[in-house]
Image (cartoon, helix red, strand yellow):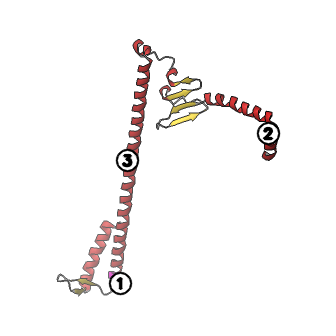
Amino acid sequence: MFARLTAHLAAHPIATLTLAALACLCHPAAAQAQWQWRDAAGRTVFSDVPPPPSVPVASVIKAPGRFAGMLRPADAAPASDAAAARPEAKGEAKAEARAETATGSEDAFQKRRAETLKAEADQAAKDKAAQEREARCAGLRGYAAALQQNRRITVPAPDGSPQHLDDDQRQAELQRTNASLAENCV
């Protein structure tokens, strides 16, 4: 289908020129029907429909056929007659307001990012501590099971030499291990 259209346009140069002229005529109308505004996050939004009512008029950068300076709520009055007489003052004030808005939104973004990174680091630290605690508890449970099964248990003596536990020592060690399990591994 596309090949047939291309061959037809190549054979009829007037049709090609007509099509090109129509394309040029359509372009300015589409370009003028664009809205441009800054959303709450500070990003510039381009659309062919007006912004939602939640977007303040001051955030609208361009409307179809108008610029941001021409957009003003019906109840808003000019700031002063002197400022109205000096158009460059309006431009300077708007540039300063845009710079403050951009700086404020950038600061807000950086603050949210820092809070997110801190929350992720805190969660990672909690997860690591929970894994280490679970590993210690698993080791204590295994040790308590070995003590209960009357296996031969060897512990280091104060001088570093191996010492085998007798029945009384085994019961005392089992009580200490069970107390530690009850306290730390509930």
Q: Which residues are magenta?
A: 146-150
Pinpoint residue 96: horizontal percent, then vertical percent: 40, 28
Q: Is residue 51 visible?
A: no
- Sequence-first disc among 3 and 1: 3
Between 91 and 63, the one nearer to me in the picture? 91
Kindly identify which residue carries mark 3: 114
Pinpoint residue 16: horizontal percent, then vertical percent: 77, 36
Point 29% across, 70% down: residue: 180
Report crowding for label 1: few under 14, some 14 to 19, many 20 or more residues within 10 A (C-alpha): few
Report crowding for label 2: few under 14, some 14 to 19, many 20 or more residues within 10 A (C-alpha): some
User: Any mark on residue 149, and which?
Assistant: 1
| Kind of residue sitting beneath label 2 | Leu
Q: Secondary structure at mark 1?
A: loop
Between 75 and 131, the one nearer to me in the picture? 75
User: Any mark on residue 9, and which?
Assistant: 2
Point 32% across, 70% down: residue: 181
Q: Quadrant of residue 135?
A: bottom left
User: Which of pointers 3 and 2 indicates the residue nearer the eye?
Assistant: 2
Q: Is residue 125 visible?
A: yes
Q: Is residue 158 magenta?
A: no
Q: Secondary structure at mark 3?
A: helix
